[in-house]
Amino acid sequence: MTEKPIDNSMIMKCVAYKKGQSLGDLTIEDISEVLKQPDTFVWLGLREPNTELLGKIQEEFGLHELAVEDARSAHQRPKIEEYGESLFLVLHTVTLGEEGVDFGESHIFVGSRFLVTVRHGASLSLNKVRKRCESMPHQMTKGPSFALYSIMDFIVDNYMPVVEGLQVRFDALEEAIFQHRPSRQTMEGLYELKRELLRLHAAITPLIDICNELMRFHDTIISKDVRVYFRDIADHIKRIDQSIDATREMLIAAMQVHLTFETVRQNEVVKGLAGWGAILAIPTMVFSWYGMNFKYMPELEWHFSYPIVVGIVVIGSLLLYRRLKRRGWI
């Protein structure tokens, strides 16, 4: 059976490195041969690969089928798993869009002689990371573990602008609240912001455990000289997580203030309605009195009874209105 041709649009970059220096681009078919050379590793970047391409990658690098299946489904939690002589990592990526935070996934296969990245959903290009690594050949001699650190550092660095963007959104919502303009849109914005902060927290918190594992284990894959760099990533993650927690606490407080303002506003409305109801009670009482069907009511024969009754109603209503106005009920 003739194999289907590989869709090269899914291959972002495939480069071999020998002693920290780039040997140029490779084709997928040449990977297994290049890996036989000493002091050489391959860095392959993929974007939304199909089943056929992942099958070919699995064959060239000897990847485990369970890890390849996870990379194909692209709905994984952040994690690190060991499969024989390679590691499989899942990292969530974030970008700040016009309507909110866009989430994606980066799946990474790393061994002592290769690094394969599989990007799904919203994520930034890794070209800058690759160029930065290639500008430091002395660091690239440490192998795929340094490239792995550079990718993780790049992904974590992109969290902070997103958190800052959410803080700007929160400041706008908070300003609307304290300008006494509570509305359903404001509350919906607060809940949406809270949901995105929770997703950010769930995406970034597992990375601390991943960094700790990379610092302590997997000696054959992670170079000893690179381990200290993962500690720096862990510290950065903790600072970002603290910013997320602080924003969440302020968000919860803002939601409570919003509900308090809404309750006060409703109370003001109820007080106003009660005040006008009290004013209307005067003419209602008088007019209902005159609506009774009694034959003998002496005041009905009075010549000035109508203007007197109207005057009493108006004066009584005005006096009650003035009293309620002074107490802030109207």
Image (cartoon, helix red, strand yellow):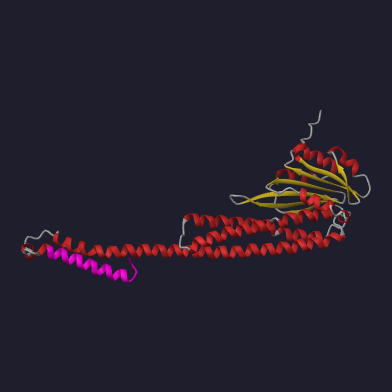
In the rendered structure, the answer to whether residue 112 lies left or right of residue 267 reads right
In the rendered structure, the answer to whether residue 238 lies left or right of residue 28 reads left
Asked if one can make out residue 238 in the rendered structure from this viewpoint, the answer is yes
**Which image quarter holds the C terminus?**
bottom left
State how many labels appear. 0
Q: Nearer the viewer, residue 300 or 13?
A: 13
- Residue at 60 percent across and 52 percent down: it is 100
- Residue at 84 percent across and 38 percent down: it is 27
**Residue span colored magenta:** 307-330
Secondary structure that dominates the magenta span: helix
- Give residue 317's position: percent from left, percent from top: 23, 66
Q: Nearer the viewer, residue 122 or 168?
A: 168
Asked if one can make out residue 216 in the rendered structure from this viewpoint, the answer is no
Q: Quadrant of residue 190?
A: bottom right
Is 318 one of the magenta-colored residues? Answer: yes
- Give residue 62's position: percent from left, percent from top: 85, 44
- Residue at 72 percent across and 42 percent down: it is 48
- Residue at 74 percent across and 51 percent down: it is 90
- Give residue 41's position: percent from left, percent from top: 88, 48
Residue that sits furthest to the front in the current view: 135
Q: Is residue 190 above or below residue 73?
A: below
Q: Is residue 77 above or below residue 25?
A: below
In the rendered structure, the answer to whether residue 205 lies left or right of residue 30 reads left
- Give residue 32's position: percent from left, percent from top: 88, 41
Q: Nearer the viewer, residue 249 or 79?
A: 249
Q: Quadrant of residue 303?
A: bottom left
**Which image quarter holds the N terminus?**
top right
Is 203 one of the magenta-colored residues? Answer: no
Q: Nearer the viewer, residue 157 or 44?
A: 157
